[in-house]
Amino acid sequence: MTRLFNDPAAFADEALEGFTAAHRRWVRPVTGGVVRATATPAGQVAVVIGGGSGHYPAFSGLVGRGLAHGAAVGNVFASPSARQIHSVATAAHAGGGVLLMYGNYAGDVLHFGQAAERLAADGIETRTFAVADDISSAGPEESAKRRGIAGDLPVFKAAAAAAEQGLPLEEVLRVAERAGARTRSFGIAFSGCTLPGADHPLFTVPEARMAVGLGIHGEPGIGEEALPTADEAARLLVETLLKELPEDVADPAGQRAAVILNGLGSVKYEELFVVYRRVAALLGDAGVEIVDPEVGELVTSFDMAGMSLTLTWLDDRLEELWRAPADTPAYRKGALDAAVPDLDRAPVTAAAQDTAVPAAPVVPAAPVVPAAPVVPAASDASRRAAGTVLAALDAVARVVDAHADELGRIDAVAGDGDHGIGMRRGSTAAHRAAADAHGLGAGAGTVLTRAADAWADKAGGTSGALWGTILRSLGTALGDRDAPDAARVAEGVTEASAAVRGLGGAEVGDKTMVDVLVPFADALAAATGEGLPLADAWDRAATTATAAAAGTADLLPRRGRARPHAEKSLGTPDAGAHSLALITRAVHGALLDHH
């Protein structure tokens, strides 16, 4: 388990702070993550990677020459927010455009997609690519739904090496696509991981058994088998991957492959080497030529006891890129010319004198006086309504905090168990931002939009993106000019429902929060259409939401991290649906108190 921490909520931030302090030669901190401490040639494509904390050396440890130009770092097992990604990409951009790369998880897809839109609006040409290498998470016919695990590394490296060669953005993207299409991974585990502050692991494996086909976020495996010997584990990994070759590879014999045997956290290096000796022999028997194998911890899951095997089937071009040199805190290969410090953006300090690049004089900067926070003008009626909004957000934060452990337990049945943690981070940050805006005299719309940005930024993950969208839609509908009536609120909820479905792609029946949001919005619109006051209409809609959330227990998930474990989730409601139902009832209480 994770034993050394201060405040669990601050764990990811403090870990990143310590990482940057230890690796000043390679990285410098920016808002949302890290970028290279060395200069990037003007016009070079910037490869920006990212994901949640808890997977070191992914993602921050892979920043440096020959690999990523920057990494956006989210909270524990949660994708970074669009704001964090935008910040890191802006800092890493060198004039050649940006390629955003990440594992194929719903939250990452949402946040990196939003960040790409913001970068494009800034005039920065941007493309995105999601690595989807885990063959256990979907069949070959649904490979686009697969999640990204240790295959991140060879795909990231191929794209980054192409960028180092000066290729334009579209060609770097094509390299990423080629590497991704030829990369497959499969994992096993003997115990689950324990998040900082938790008193039990996210999943357990019975004595003398192993979980087969698990992810890297504490998701349980898709099955169990008897605990193997090292040679039996190697055979399972190799034979499973050799059953699915890329479309243009008819036979493994005569093929070359980059091979990664990845430790997931607490399987020791000696154990990995014992397994790898048999992996190498089995691949050799199949006629596969192994190219620059990697054995060690490259994409982890805190203290999970497990391993994964990755094969990237190489052609001449991919082999060249796989063999290309790289120099990062956690991954080094070959030799590079002397680094050039990024003196324009990273002055050398006394604490960084161990760097291999020459120091330069540091000119003290003039003190920066932060501008006083301002909010848009608002009518008195809207400012009064903002008080009700603030009370509602306080009720949301309170109910989430009270049920965070329950939400995590529900989520862990078929997911990664972090829903309660993420919702707590997001709702607390939203209430704090709303209180600040209200204190400055903001109207209802601004209070909600400030809360939306804070929720998305601090929570990250799928829930952060979706709740940021919900609050922003409400804020846009309410505005800062008039006192919102019941019909206006219902209109905002309806718009939020449509926005969430458009952003995440889920529909009713997929076992997500949409199964509650849609009937809640419909019921609220119907009740306000009948002329009911807002509190009464909200009460009726909240009752509908509670029933809809309970009904998700009978559904099989068709989206998100629970999808590969669909049968395990039968009988348990969706965590996002359940939290939304709790929130609708809590908000009703605030409406009654401020009627």
Image (cartoon, rainbow, N blue to C red):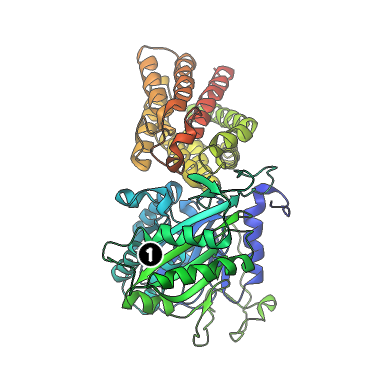
How many numbered discs? 1
Q: Where residue 363 appears, x then y in whole percent?
A: 62, 79
Q: Amino acid at mark 1?
A: Leu
Residue 589 sits above or below residue 159 on the image = above
260 or 147: nearer the viewer: 260
Please name the residue that numbered disc 1 is placed on: 99
Q: Is residue 367 visible?
A: no
Residue 239 sits above or below residue 467 on the image = below
Q: Quadrant of residue 465?
A: top left
Q: Residue at x 36, y 30 (%)?
A: 508
Q: Residue at x 62, y 31 (%)?
A: 403
Q: Where residue 410 appears, x then y in whole percent?
A: 55, 33
Q: Residue at x 51, y 62 (%)?
A: 234
Q: Where residue 553 appears, x then y in whole percent?
A: 47, 27
509 or 457: nearer the viewer: 509
Point out the image quarter for the C terminus.
top right
Q: Secondary structure at mark 1?
A: strand
Residue 252 sits above or below residue 482 on the image = below
